[in-house]
Amino acid sequence: MFGKRFTLLKIFGFQVWIDFSWLILGLLITWTLADGLFPQNYRGLSTMSYWLMGVGGALGLLFSIVFHELWHSLIARKFGLPIKGITLFIFGGVAEMTDEPRSPKAEFFMAIAGPISSIILGLSLLGLRFLLVGSGWSRAVTGVVGYLAFLNLILAGFNLLPAFPLDGGRVLRSVLWGMKNNIRWATHIASQIGAGFGALLIVIGVFDLIFGNFIGGIWMFLIGMFLRSASQTSYQQLLIRRALEGESVRKFMVSDPVTVSPSISLKTLVEDYIFKHHYKMYPVVDRGELIGCITLDQVKQVPKENWPQHRVEEMARNCSDKNTIGPDEDVMKALSTMNRTNASRLMVVEGNVLVGVIALKDVMKLLSLKMDLEKI
Ligand SMILES: [Zn+2]
């Protein structure tokens, strides 16, 4: 879902990442504010003031989104749900859960926490603006504070749309879930409504484009597309989770995987293993003992002409929780590790012994058979 991102800060034990797409958004917002919104609403200030106001507005937006996601994360933690961190990307922010909420109640409070925090922040800023205006602060300052108050209320309003996976849609799902005690049905209905809202935004975006509101139209269109795909993906993820829950890694692994010896050259590895088996990862085994693994990415780091001189053991990566999993672990855990590390294969290890390899492709194949047979 995300491209390149880097850590912005760490707060209350949550990592906050910023995606490069957000930087583009930040620049766009600074420019729109400094060149459009502020000069139109606060006439007679210097160009410099408008740009400073623009930067203040964009930083304030960043703060507002982190504040909103932080409240989701804090409440999630209260209900025992681990949060990987907060990522800011072009459509705002997202608190990344590594698991789904366990109960309708947990989901309800987690979802509602964000918009409520934004409403409280928005109203506080509105109050602050009145105080600042009353005590004669410059219009540049009160303008930015007023803009941020308005922005937080809009943020709360938009997120409260009952369009899953937006906050309002999650609130709706939790209520439906609580009513029938059936999360699959609740997610199905909520994500259908989410996709419907997405389609509506796309239509509004197209009309905006036709009637000349170019930037607004593009935004509506893109947000609509995003909402549609996010609602469908969330439903599919739930189905996958349901189908795989409680299944062990052992059931999906290949128990006699292709392994390589540490002493062969990279050239031999490429010619006799990679070209033959087309896997991206090979466990490195020396006299029955697993010593690590070698991946295609590591081979690519060495120029082709040097492949004959280098041996696999020089490049092999040690075993860690990033490339191994136990045979009796839940297969969902294997998928979440693959997702986190971008690997499509993991070594299945019992103690120090390699007992198999689990591949994303095999899990998916079995999953589709299972879903086909059970019509879940
Ligand atoms: Zn939210």
Image (tube, rainbow, N blue to C red):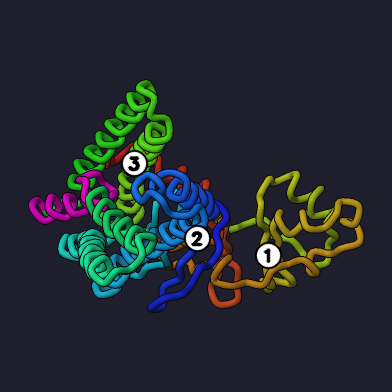
Amino acid at dot 3: Leu
- Magenta residue span: 159-180
Residue 309 placement, left or right of 92: right
Give coordinates of residue 104: x percent, y percent. Answer: 17, 60
Above or below 292: residue 149: above
Give coordinates of residue 48: x percent, y percent. Answer: 52, 57
| Label 1 sits on residue | 293
Name the residue nearer the viewer: 207 or 251.
207
Q: CA distance from mark 2 to mark 3?
A: 20 Å
- Residue at the extreme front: 44
| Label 3 sits on residue | 227
User: Within the magenta stretch, is there residue 163?
Assistant: yes
Give coordinates of residue 46: x percent, y percent. Answer: 48, 54
Please report contact status of discs 2 and 3: CB closer than 8 Å, yes or no.
no
| Label 2 sits on residue | 18
Amino acid at dot 1: Cys
Can the viewer see residue 61?
yes
Amino acid at dot 2: Ile
The residue shown at (22%, 65%) is 130
For numbered disc 2, what is the local secondary structure?
A: strand
Determine crowd level at label 3: few under 14, some 14-19, many 20+ residues with C-alpha closer than 10 A: many
Res 242 label: none
Q: CA distance from mark 3 to mark 1?
A: 39 Å
Helix, strand or loop: magenta stretch: helix
